Image (cartoon, rainbow, N blue to C red):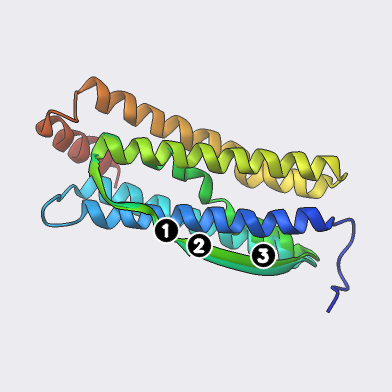
Amino acid sequence: MESQVRQNYHRDSEAAINRMVNIELSASYTYTSMAFYFSRDDVALKGFAHFFKENSDEEKEHAEKLLSFQNKRGGRIFLQDVKKPERDEWGSGLEAMQCALQLEKKEHAEKLLCFQNKRGGRIFLQDVKKPERDEWGSGLEAMQCALQLEKNVNQALLDLHKLASEHGDPHMCDFLETHYLNEQVEAIKKLGDHITNLTRMDANKNKMAEYLFDKHTLEGKA
């Protein structure tokens, strides 16, 4: 049934919001994999586990905001499958941070869903695939994966903002600028800083350096 509150909400924007929700949920799924990988008894890096769990929660919150937006705009929600992460082992803390940087872009999905509803769009979610891996290697490897993930999410948000601008939708542009774009830049910068410090400490080869980073940089902020 067509929404009675829908106004100036293009079908392309509605569909893009649904796709963005899937991106955010996929990122959350991957961060969850990272978080519990680093809390395993044979990895036991509490700081990395806490860091990635917070990122997972944040990405999920972003997806929910997008779902709420969809309802407010009179859009319709169509969810997709969430795929599993690409790996199960996340390697060193540095590798995990690099993976996380790429993931950061996902947390904004929930905000987009909220926007879709606000504008009278309809949310149609897609499958959320599992992460590409189950093992994440070192902390450095995981951070590198996260960095790429955040960059992918950021690009999707920039494309969404461009689409809203092309369709003359200032409300959607403001929503993205207020809730997503600045946060995304800050998340990418944080991951980049962590990767730089882990690399400087040669954390991939020096497990004591990785442990100290986990204990004093990540766990110290928990």
Q: Do the residues labelled 1 and 2 touch (CB within 8 Å)?
A: yes
Tell me the kind of residue under disc 2.
Val
Q: In this view, does 156 lie above or below 75?
A: above
Distance in Å between CA atoms under marks 1 and 3: 20 Å
Q: Is residue 48 left or right of residue 30?
A: left
Where residue 50 appears, as percent x and y from the top left, is 29, 51
Task: Residue under label 3, please give it.
Answer: 68
Label 3 to label 2, Cα distance in Å? 19 Å
Q: Is residue 166 left or right of residue 186?
A: right
The disc labelled 1 sits on which kind of residue? Answer: Tyr
Where, by quadrant of the figure, is residue 109 drawn? bottom right
Question: Disc 1 marks which residue?
Answer: 29
In the figure, 72 relative to 164: above or below? Answer: below
Q: Can residue 103 be seen from the camera position used here?
A: yes
Q: How crowded is mark 1: few (under 14 residues within 10 Å), some or many (20 or more)?
A: many
Q: Earlier in the sequence, mark 1 or mark 3?
A: 1
Q: Could you say where residue 120 lies in the image, as x and y percent from the top left?
A: 81, 66
Q: Which residue is drawn at 46% across and 42% down?
A: 149
Q: Which residue is drawn at 53% across and 40% down?
A: 152
Local SS, label 1: helix
Secondary structure under the numbered disc 2 in the rendered image: strand
Q: Mark 2 points at which residue?
A: 128
